[in-house]
Amino acid sequence: MDETPGELIKELKRELALMKERYEKALKDQEILLRELERLREENEKLRKERSNK
């Protein structure tokens, strides 16, 4: 089945929109993970200080 240029453009636009959604979700997920990593680093540092004070 041959697609017309207009159909190809529509399909490419749909694919591009999906890629954009996935990219934006990945950025949000990355932000969440970076915040969690920072929280864990702070907790780790706190625990190290507590251990060294014993």
Image (cartoon, rainbow, N blue to C red):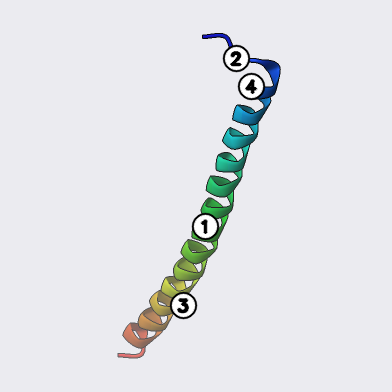
Instruction: Identify the residue at horizontal 64%, vertical 21% (top origin).
Output: 8
The amino acid sitting under disc 1 is: Gln
Dot 4 crowding, Cα within 10 Å, few <14, some 14–19, many 20+: few
Residue corresponding to mark 2: 3
Compared with 48, 22 (above or below) is above
* Disc 1: which residue: 30
Label 2 vs 1, first from the N-terminus? 2
Q: CA distance from mark 1 to mark 3?
A: 18 Å
Mark 1 lies on a secondary structure that is helix
**28 above or below 19?**
below
Distance from Cα at disc 1 to Cα at disc 4: 32 Å
Tag 2: amino acid: Glu
**Spatial CA span between label 4 and label 2:** 6 Å
Does residue 17 appear left or right of residue 32 in this picture?
right
Q: Residues within 10 Å of mark 1 (few under 14, many from 20)?
A: few
Do labels 3 and 4 touch, CB within 8 Å? Answer: no
Q: Disc 3 or disc 4, which is closer to the eye?
A: 4
Q: CA distance from mark 3 to mark 4?
A: 51 Å
Q: Amino acid at mark 4?
A: Leu
Earlier residue among tags 3 and 2? 2
Q: Nearer the viewer, mark 1 or mark 4?
A: 4
Residue 8 image label: 4
Report if the CB atoms under discs 3 and 2 are less than 8 Å apart. no
Q: Closer to the N terminus: mark 1 or mark 3?
A: 1
Q: What residue is at 52 percent from the left and 51 percent from the top?
A: 26
Structural crowding at the residue carrying mark 2, measured as other residues with C-alpha within 10 Å and reported as few (<14), some (14–19) or many (≥20): few
Element carrying mark 4: helix
- Look at discs 3 and 2 and give the one toward the viewer: 2
Say which residue label 3 marks. 42
- Image quadrant where residue 31 sits: bottom right
